[in-house]
Image (cartoon, helix red, strand yellow):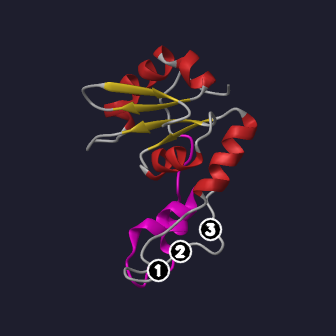
Amino acid sequence: MRLDTESASIGQVISEKQVSDLPLNGREFTSLKLLQSGAQPQAGGEQGTRPGEGGGITLGTPAIMAYAAANGFVILTNDLDFGIALTIADREKPSVAQIRGEDLRPVSIGTHSVLALRQMRVELEAGALLTIGPKRIRLRLLPLR
């Protein structure tokens, strides 16, 4: 498992130029997810770039999950789509750690999140959905049923 439990540092910074170069004519903020490494529009899926265009956006969730499962990664996210995808997939990998809360700044959630990841390391290596909230932690072993 390749999980840095020693640091709560941010792994990727999106530059101002990358943000300003986005086609945000309709001001659909969810297209900002495309800036993350590995995120790609899902071919043949609903991938509207403006509200009302396609009804939603799929940003490579299956591709990210396949990559994470093949490489032994845990997906750390605030996106609830990964939990839904785990339920649909009915698989034991990859593990997903969802961070929930209003204040998602590393200074606010970093220590709590790292402690939860350390505490649930064995379960995450085996396959689990870990939800880290400001007041509680919830763990469900995979596959979800």
Residue depicted at x 55% and y 67% = 18
As measured in the structure, the alpha-carbon distance from the residue carrying label 3 to the one carrying label 1 is 12 Å
**Residue 120 belongs to magenta span:** no
Q: Position of residue 25 (x, y in %)?
A: 42, 85
**Residue 23 belongs to magenta span:** yes
Q: Identify the residue position indicated by label 1 in the image.
A: 54
Q: In this view, does 72 lie above or below 90?
A: above
Nearer-N-terminus badge (1/2): 2
Judge from the rendering whether residue 106 lies leftward or rightward of residue 49; answer left or right. Answer: left
Whether tag 3 and tag 2 are in contact, CB under 8 A, the answer is yes
For the residue labelled by badge 3, is the local secondary structure a helix, a strand or a loop?
loop
- Classify the position of the N terminus by image quarter: top right
Q: Identify the residue position indicated by label 2 in the image.
A: 47
For residue 131, the mark is none
Query: Which amino acid type corresponds to the residue marked 3 in the rendered image?
Result: Gln
Residue depicted at x 50% and y 45% = 87
As measured in the structure, the alpha-carbon distance from the residue carrying label 3 to the one carrying label 2 is 7 Å
Residue in the foreground of this view, choosing between 117 and 10? 117
Q: Is residue 28 visible?
A: yes
Q: Where is residue 64 in the image (x, y as percent from the top left)?
A: 64, 50
Whether tag 1 and tag 2 are in contact, CB under 8 A, the answer is yes
For residue 42, the mark is 3
- Label 1 neighbourhood size at 10 Å, few (<14), some (14-19), many (20+)? few
Query: Which amino acid type corresponds to the residue marked 1 in the rendered image?
Result: Gly
As measured in the structure, the alpha-carbon distance from the residue carrying label 1 to the one carrying label 2 is 6 Å
Residue in the foreground of this view, choosing between 23 and 74? 74
Q: Where is residue 106 in the image (x, y as percent from the top left)?
A: 39, 36
- Label 2 neighbourhood size at 10 Å, few (<14), some (14-19), many (20+)? some
Residue that extends furthest to the right in the rendered view of this protein: 70
In the image, which residues are magenta?
Answer: 11-36
